[in-house]
Image (tube, rainbow, N blue to C red):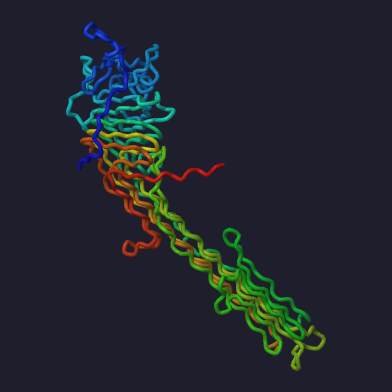
């Protein structure tokens, strides 16, 4: 599929400058001679002469970086040649602002300042011919830039351009930039070319190929064992041991982030009446069926037991990744699935009511304290389970990334995305801890109203939430953000296959709850600009 979005005349004049205006006798009025002749270095990359004063020459097979970069003594690495072209050779020559590269493979990342041209696929034969190989080479460029890691070609703009204005345009001609699989800085994405902020470049008769993105890692599962259980309540003291027998002390379980579950204190045993216990904590927003309520002390009726604590709430499954991700100087950053939240802490059981001792049928022997038994304290609740961790994003596959303020033109070239990585599966949540029984009430020697009542059992902790799945990696020919992109005649820009979003924890393809969004497969995708940073 070929796309014709814009057809424009593109100037390839980028190096060498123009000579002064020359006049002859046929020009009767010099004011009318306004068109100066171009220099020998100007012209189409296919036909312009390859002169030492027109560029820095580089050969991966026969060059040496200690050489001056002439045709007879080329340098070896592209980046060294770019430095000489931008700043001038060591012996004081003016910057040529052009690199001419032999056919061959350069296993290096390069950074090309806007305003420096890169012309590849030169013959470089033994006869010193550095002309373009043949006019129909198109995307079959023989100058290959293929580093094992990283983004093969970066075009720099702003302060990194060699000069400002219209001349700060780079012509990239006759090269093949090949990104390795999962070679960007996140070790997941693959990007073949990146135009930094304000960079300007024309890509002609070249091939820009992204590799495959890597699948995202699954989110970490929470522990498979239960969260910490609550503590057993304390037993109340027996009747006839004190006129006012103190209620059993509360037990406390400290869970994650300092959240506590506390069993209610047992009611004191007394002479005429027993005291009520206290309620278990933390109290839920709604307390159904008197969960965690305090037991009542004995008066005209025997004491009552404490209520069982309410179970902590189970956390819901977290959402999958929904953002499209962001473009930046390191390429593309995707979105992880949301982490699962912790389950709720179980409520402590209520403390049991205390017994009484003074009544017509007091069973305490003469000479001993006459108070009733104390109530047992409630058991503390179990801790909530931890949530799973969100699945990671799959790596993107993007031919060219164009950042804010950049200007990209693609002519008679191929720009191809490959396969985006699949998003990672979300991690599973942890089961909550169990709530144990409350403490026993103190024993009596006979009548029911003399005994102490048991504390209520603690509530179980809620299950931690399953996490969401990660975003699937995009497959894009071009990804841009606030950039100018022009696709000229014979520009073939195509995506490959986008990655699928990761499933949420404990979900299935048939019921894909918490699934991350699939990646996008488009020839050109415009990303939203990130929100500006708030003022300091």
Image quadrant in which you'd find residue 82: top left
Q: Tell me if residue 177 comes above or below residue 115 in the rendering.
A: below
Outermost front residue: 29
Q: Position of residue 393 (x, y in %)?
A: 39, 50
Look at the image and tell me in which quarter the C terminus lies: top right
Look at the image and tell me in which quarter the N terminus lies: top left
Outermost bottom residue: 360
Image quadrant in which you'd find residue 442: bottom right
Horizontal relation, residue 137 to residue 369: left or right? left
Q: Nearer the viewer, residue 476 or 140?
A: 476
Q: Nearer the viewer, residue 153 or 370?
A: 153
Residue 333 appears in view: no
Name the residue at 21% across, 8% down.
26
Q: Position of residue 102 (x, y in %)?
A: 26, 23
Horizontal relation, residue 41 to residue 389: left or right? left
Horizontal relation, residue 357 to residue 180: left or right? right
Figure disc tally: 0
Residue 178 appears in view: yes
Horizontal relation, residue 351 to residue 88: left or right? right
Q: Tell me if residue 240 comes above or below residue 210 in the rendering.
A: below
Q: Position of residue 381 (x, y in %)?
A: 58, 69
Image quadrant in which you'd find residue 73: top left
Outermost top residue: 25
Q: Position of residue 236 (x, y in %)?
A: 69, 77
Q: Nearer the viewer, residue 147 or 171?
A: 171
């Amino acid at each position: 599929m070929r796309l014709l979005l814009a057809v424009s005349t593109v100037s390839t004049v980028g190096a060498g400058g123009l000579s002064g205006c020359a006049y002859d006798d046929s020009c009767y009025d010099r004011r009318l001679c306004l068109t100066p002749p171009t220099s020998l270095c100007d012209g189409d990359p296919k036909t312009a002469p390859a002169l030492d004063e027109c560029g820095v020459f580089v050969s991966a097979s026969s060059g040496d970086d200690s050489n001056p970069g002439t045709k007879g003594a080329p340098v070896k690495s592209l980046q060294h040649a770019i430095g000489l072209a931008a700043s001038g050779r060591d012996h004081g020559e003016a910057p040529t602002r052009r690199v001419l590269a032999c056919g061959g493979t350069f296993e290096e990342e390069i950074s090309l300042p806007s305003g420096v041209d890169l012309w590849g696929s030169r013959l470089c034969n033994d006869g010193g011919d550095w002309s373009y190989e043949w006019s129909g080479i198109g995307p079959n460029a023989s100058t290959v830039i293929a580093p094992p890691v990283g983004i093969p070609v970066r075009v720099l703009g702003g302060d990194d351009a060699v000069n400002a204005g219209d001349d700060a345009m780079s012509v990239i001609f006759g090269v093949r930039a090949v990104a390795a699989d999962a070679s960007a800085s996140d070790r997941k994405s693959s990007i073949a070319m990146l135009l930094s902020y304000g960079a300007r470049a024309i890509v002609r008769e070249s091939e820009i190929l992204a590799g495959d993105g890597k699948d995202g890692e699954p989110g970490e599962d929470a522990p498979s064992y239960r969260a910490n259980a609550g503590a057993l309540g304390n037993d109340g003291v027996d009747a006839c041991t004190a006129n006012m027998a103190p209620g059993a002390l509360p037990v406390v379980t400290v869970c994650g982030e300092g959240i506590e579950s506390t069993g209610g204190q047992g009611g004191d045993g007394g002479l005429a009446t027993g005291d009520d216990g206290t309620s278990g904590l933390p109290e839920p927003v709604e307390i159904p069926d008197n969960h965690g309520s305090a037991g009542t002390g004995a008066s005209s009726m025997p004491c009552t037991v404490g209520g069982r604590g309410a179970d902590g709430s189970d956390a819901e499954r977290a959402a999958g990744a929904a953002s499209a991700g962001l473009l930046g100087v390191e390429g593309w950053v995707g979105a992880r699935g949301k982490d699962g939240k912790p389950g709720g802490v179980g409520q402590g059981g209520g403390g049991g009511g205390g017994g009484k001792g003074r009544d017509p049928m007091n069973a305490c022997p003469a000479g001993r304290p006459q108070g009733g038994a104390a109530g047992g304290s409630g058991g503390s609740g179990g801790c909530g389970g931890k949530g799973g961790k969100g699945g990671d994003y799959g790596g993107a596959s993007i031919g060219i990334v164009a950042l804010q303020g950049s200007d990209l033109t693609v002519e008679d070239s191929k720009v191809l995305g490959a396969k985006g990585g699949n998003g990672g599966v979300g991690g599973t949540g942890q089961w909550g801890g169990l709530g144990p029984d409350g403490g026993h009430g103190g024993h009596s020697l006979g009548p029911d109203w003399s005994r102490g009542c048991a504390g209520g059992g603690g509530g179980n902790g809620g299950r931690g939430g399953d996490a969401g799945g990660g975003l699937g990696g995009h497959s894009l020919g071009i990804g841009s953000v606030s950039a100018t992109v022009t696709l000229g005649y014979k520009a073939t820009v195509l995506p490959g296959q986008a990655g699928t979003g990761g499933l949420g924890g404990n979900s299935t393809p048939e019921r894909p709850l918490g699934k991350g969004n699939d990646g996008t497969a488009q020839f050109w995708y415009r990303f939203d600009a990130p929100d500006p940073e708030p003022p300091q």
